[in-house]
Amino acid sequence: MDILVVGGGGREHAICWSLAKSPTADTIYCAPGNAGIGQIATLVPIQVHEFDKLVAFAQDKQVGLVVIGPDDPLAEGIVDAFEAENIPVFGPRKNAAHIEGSKTFMKDLLKKYNIPTAAYEKFDNYDEALAYLHTQPIPVVIKADGLAAGKGVTVAFSREQAESALKDIMVSKVFGDSGSQVVIEEFMEGQEMSILAFVDGEVVRPMAAAQDHKQVYDGDKGPNTGGMGTYSPLPHIANSIIAEAIETIIKPTAKAMVAEGRPFRGILFAGLMITPDNKPKTIEFNARFGDPETQVVLPRLKSDLLEIFLAAVNGTLDQVEIEWSDEAAVCVVLASGGYPASYPKGLTIHGLDQSKDQLIFHAGTARNEAGEWVTNGGRVLGVVGMGPDIASARDKAYQIAEGVTFEGKHCRTDIAAKALV
């Protein structure tokens, strides 16, 4: 069957790459895609918010499945738009995607159903939020309620930083309407972990666990980004803790969404903290594949991704076989100088043509008039190393990363180092 993937980053490149391995996949379209995705899929010049055009395209091409990558269109109801025309689509409806679209909704849901998470309060009034903030210990976490491209969360290590973050969100409106409400949350210490799961209602099929590196600099320093690198599996986190997270957090959340009349179908992504007493707690939920977690999880999937997607859409997710490779995967993100703040575009990328046999997912690339690869985003490439263990996969990833250069290239040098201690 023909497939339409909506989105245009490294996550969508990984999804298209994985779907292309399916014997039942024919033409893969990607809207809008990027230059790298264009090597394996047919690019469609339609933006992710142009629902009418995307629906019309899917009807015209009679695609057998639509797969939604990014968070914004999910929150705006893109799945509902396809379902209204009886087009098979993988992803949560608008009322279910709300678990990512509103942090206050998510926190209230977890509180109502006694699902482990950090203590919090929510505010829609700046003065009241500021007064509460002054009663809280430092460090403290400040979160804009709505979507903010992964940048709406500040972990404040000083009173001044906390006040500045609150003012930016609620007064300066740096995230627009996403900051009309704010969540002030207790700071949790420990190891972070990501567990993604294929979900259809109360049926939960977990994927291999991964760990993201959010801060821009080594040693988890600097501002949060969309993600500077990931690795999977997590040899330093006990399987019993991963199992506990699935049983006490992910499955109860899927059940709670059904109870609330918001049954979730798609990828439920749990961002978790393993506290010093080895208890998993919820940091956040996303309603789609993580980026760059997808870039290490899907290369470890031995089963047919298209088959899994279709099973979820057809209500047979509990019956499909899902196998994972024992191989390790490490993804190192090559970012533009200046990211996550302002950065230049259009800089020539060298070394990509020499690395054709390597696993490289394009996040922000384009081709210039001369046909050269150029930068076109903050996160430019995700280079993935595979190996029998984290150490060898990590070596491979950094070896590939060294061979690809562009002016101002920045990458963390400590991706997956936590797993080797």
Image (tube, rainbow, N blue to C red):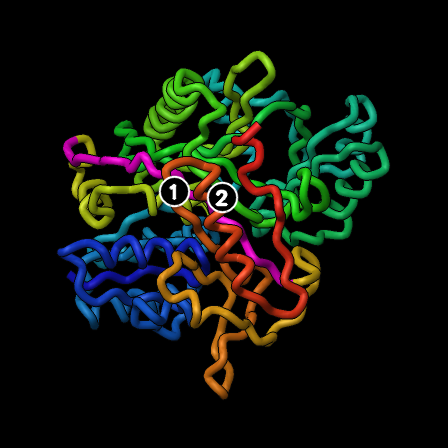
- The spot of residue 283 in percent (x, y) is 55, 30
Q: Earlier in the sequence, mark 2 or mark 1?
A: 1
The stretch in magenta equals 319-336
Q: Of the residues shown, which amino acid type is indicated by label 2? A: Arg
> For the residue carrying disc 2, how many other residues have a C-alpha within 10 Å: few (<14), some (14-19), or many (20+)?
many
Residue 111 is at least partly visible in this image? no
Q: Which residue is mark 1?
A: 387
Alpha carbon of mark 2 to alpha carbon of mark 1: how far? Answer: 8 Å
Residue 104 vs 19, above or below: the answer is above
Q: Which residue is mark 2?
A: 394
Q: Which structural element holds mark 1?
A: strand
Is 228 or 236 nearer to us in this picture? Answer: 236
- The spot of residue 5 in percent (x, y) is 32, 60
Is 396 or 274 nearer to us in this picture? Answer: 396
> For the residue carrying disc 1, how many other residues have a C-alpha within 10 Å: few (<14), some (14-19), or many (20+)?
some
- In the image, taking residue 363 as reference, residue 217 lies left or right, namely right
- In the image, taking residue 125 as reference, residue 86 lies left or right, namely left
